[in-house]
Amino acid sequence: MSSKQPPKLPLKIFRLYCSDERIEELEGDLYEVYSEFVEERGGRFAGVFYWWLVIRGFRSYALKRTKMKNNRVNTSLTFLKHNLAIAWRNLLKNKTTATINVLGLAIGVGAFLAILSIVRFELSFNTQIPDKENIHRIYTSFTGSFTQTNKGVAAPVGPYVEENFSGLASVSYFNTYSAPVEILDGEEKKEFDRQNNLILVGDSFFKVIGQYEWLAGNSENALSEPFKVVLTTEQAEKYFGHRDWLDMINRTIFYRDSLKVSVSGIVQHPSYNTDFDFTDFISYGTLTNSWLKDEFNDDWGSTNSSSQLWIKTSDNVNKADILLQLEDLDKHVVEQTEDSDWVQSYKLQDLSEVHFSPDIGIFDNGRDPAHAPTLTILSFVALSILLIAIFNFINLETAQSTTKSKEVGVRKVLGSPRHQLVARFLTESILISFLAVVLAIPIAHYSFIFFEEFIPAGVALNYYSPIFWLVIVGLTLLVGVIAGIYPSWVISSFRPVKALSSGASSNNPGGSLIRKALILFQFLFSQLLIVGTLAIAWQISFMLDKDLGFKEDGIIYFYTPYYENYSKADLMKNYLDQLPEVMDYALQRTPPAQRGYSTSTVKYYTDTVEVVTSAHQKSGDTTYFKFYDIELLAGRNLLPNDTLRELVINETFMRDLGFDDPREAVGTTFEFNSKDHTVVGIVEDFHFRSLHHPIEPLLYRYADESRCFALKVKGEQIEQTIDKLTDKWNEVYPEYPLTVYFMDETIEQFYETERRASKLASTATGIAILISCLGLFGLISFTIVQKSKELGIRKVLGASILQIGTILSKEFIVLIIVAFVISTPISYYIIDRWMDDFAYQTSISLWIYLLGGLVSVAIALASIGAKVWKASGANPIDSLRYE
Amino acid sequence: MKGTNLGEFEELVLLTVGILYDNAYSVAIQRELNKQTERKVSISSVHAAVYRLEEKGLLNSRMGEMSSERGGKRKRLFTISQAGKVALETANELRNRMRNQIPNIALENLR
């Protein structure tokens, strides 16, 4: 028999409701049925199947029995029981409406729960690290020949800060690292793939980030000597296969074949969310005493993002004090790096900001940072979906109120006070909300699996946290009360005489106005989402299809390591000459389009006025323009000599220089790198950055020894070319892996944020539309029952099917049109704001809005269509006959 | 005491318990029913039926042995009680008696 265990959550739910008397046999039965299912059809849907079993098993025979004693304390309990019984019977009586109500709410609450979990998850990072307010990161900001930030600092900065800064409790500088691992287990060698969360660090790290609990070794000196390593418990168990921590001390571990270190401590990683996910802490002395030091530059001018600096301030120290000292550091650095054509300055970042700064990043191999605006939008979307679902519920309930008027009448005549009636109907809505929330848990649970790729790893419903269950209970009550209070107030306001006389007031004017307003809101929101989704999709396809001004298809590129001698790159170059698959190749510093950029200051004179501005710069060999199909408008290409002060510029630069005709611009000189350079050629503009940015002045100069190789390969031969390249690469650079980039993929990645937004928007739209459809379906079913007599008479008098259909759907169509009128300016405004991000925008024509309106009309008609068709085709005799 | 009339499904379950004699527990009953009647019977409807029959006194039950197939849980084994036997016979007799009262002519020349 299969040994696969059934999923835990449904089993827990089952144990919760099942009586002690039956639990053993029933659980055994479920287990047996489940394992039979797994054996016959595999594990794919087994989880869902088990859920189904547990839900189906929720029947009287399994339930716990409560023995009710007849005393006064229990009166209110009796009332509750009575209300529950009535509510339950009511649900069973109107199965369609009940299903629609529960399903609509469940989807809404499920989406809400899922999104809430994502937002909560992201917000929870680093919030529980001890003394979190005092922890900061120092990172680098560059200005000058390129403008960007780097989450790392130059290697000497760490020791400098430690020595010269005051007001700091502790300082930790470290390098993140990754390497394959080998363990000697007796005679046997155990190998592990590349481990990504290694860190080369000193003891002070544990003072700055005090989130660890020490199980073996101690935090004071575990890393004070070279060739020591501290492991987290998970990692230690992975390496050694047992949990006897003390036994692991002094065991030997090899990193990247030859770095031999011994274990000096075991720490427990905290259970809360933190960005400090390191698994192996190798002592910093190891770096300075081994070949590792060749991998990391140690001068003031080289900044590597893996080399980071964290500080913890003393308790009473003002942040401004640290900032002042950073200014001194900046001055010191300028002295150390006089020759460079950029300035690096150091900034302070609070620990609380680290998880939310996509432009800086967290750790090289760590988590992706979260995007705070996206989280805000997500929260709004979650709330709106929940509201739509609640509005739906309110609509259906108020529409149905007339069917309950008799009940209200009888109860009032028998002396029931109004608050008791409200309680009676509220019980019903809370019961529905309870069912919906219960159903929402698996919906949210499985949506995480379904949307795995665009949800951060590790998000899950936290079933073990009491807060989660508190939220669930709170949500049940809140949704139940919000959704139920208005309908129960309306229903309980019926006057008994009117309610009991035959024609109970079916058109309560106030109620129907609110109903219309709620429907209006639903359509409004759906239309905003539809138009938004269309606009985002439109802009993305526009950006991907736009001609960038250079050739991008079939081009792959790779970088040779900059710390290796260039003669090795020459070997690769010679090999490319021999490869028949490579049609053409070019050597460059950077590809024509990429995320990063570098700018330089240039000086020129127009009409005797000196202008200082900045221009982007690219460099590479002389085949660049031919290779990328970039047209030379005037002048000539560069000569392959980097001592000549010659440049090629783009059209935009030419216009900035004050020329309209490219031919006139040839021969102009301007100052660049503090030396005069001559323009020898003008090329047409091309998009060297994403379309978020306009084309700016660009200069191109010749550079020897460029390390980025771009190849043009025939489409069908790309794979075999990469295989051949990899073989050659492993021969030339045996220690580094080859990473091949595709030009078109690089460009697609510019728009990753937009693509996520697009996915998100379309999912939200789908959910909103689904819930609205359910609501419309419920409403129309009810309207048809209410109007059956009217429809019968009209048919007898000769109304056509089309006329009847119009009567039934008119109200909705009018509402959709009103929603359209209101939503168009709102969506226009939102899309306009969103488009501001892009320098190149697709023209959103009016018909996108029209399409949004039409789609919502079509959806409305589709969801009510079948019912309307059936009603208008019905035999009038059926509705008019009395007996 | 609830009525001892047998529903159609209850009768099938009762018969199955008899067929399985000493190994009649819910999952086995479900399997046997699926085999005999070629319809999809869910485990929860079998549960509902056997517990109802036990309440009516038509089935007796005891707990069986532990088994690893069931994650170490014991099963509840059912046997037909005296009352169950009587109910089966009554139902059977009633059906035969009524079947025999149908005149032959009613079953001829059927379309």
Image: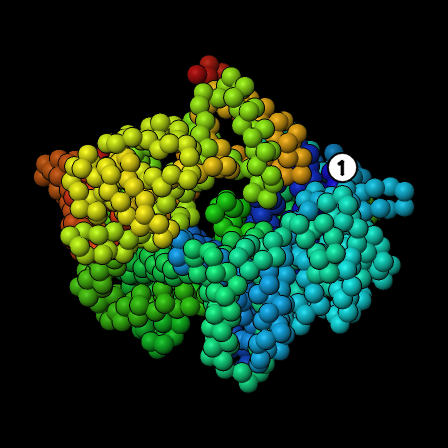
Place residue B42 in its image quadrant.
top right
| Residue A292 percent across, percent down from the top left | 69, 51
Q: Quadrant of the C terminus of chain A?
A: top left
Q: Quick one: quadrant of the N terminus of chain A?
A: top right
Could you tell me which chain the residue with mark 1 belongs to?
Answer: A
| Residue drawn where x is 57% and y is 65% of the image | A157
Q: Residue at x 27, y 56 (%)?
A: A612
Q: Amino acid at mark 1?
A: Met
Identify the residue shown where x is 60% and y is 63%: A156
The answer, for residue A184, to whether it is visible in the render is yes
Q: Residue furthest bottom?
A: A316
* Residue B77 visible: no
A878 or A261, nearer to the observer: A261
- Residue A173: x and y in percent read 62, 64
Label 1, residues with CA under 10 Å away: few <14, some 14-19, many ≥20: few
Which residue is farthest top? B109
Q: Tell me if residue A137 comes above or below residue A178 in the rendering.
A: below
Q: Residue at label 1?
A: A1
Residue drawn at (44%, 23%) of the image: A584
Left or right: A548 with respect to A232? left
Say left or right for A693 vs B26.
left
Q: Position of residue A537 (x, y in %)?
A: 31, 41
Is A704 drawn above or below residue A233 in the view shown? above
Tell me the quarter of the picture where residue A43 sits. top right
Residue closest to the eye, B88 or A750: A750
Q: In the image, is residue A110 above or below residue A417?
A: above
Left or right, residue B64 beside residue A136: right
Q: Is residue A669 left or right of residue B87?
A: left
Label count reads 1
Colour treatment of the image = rainbow
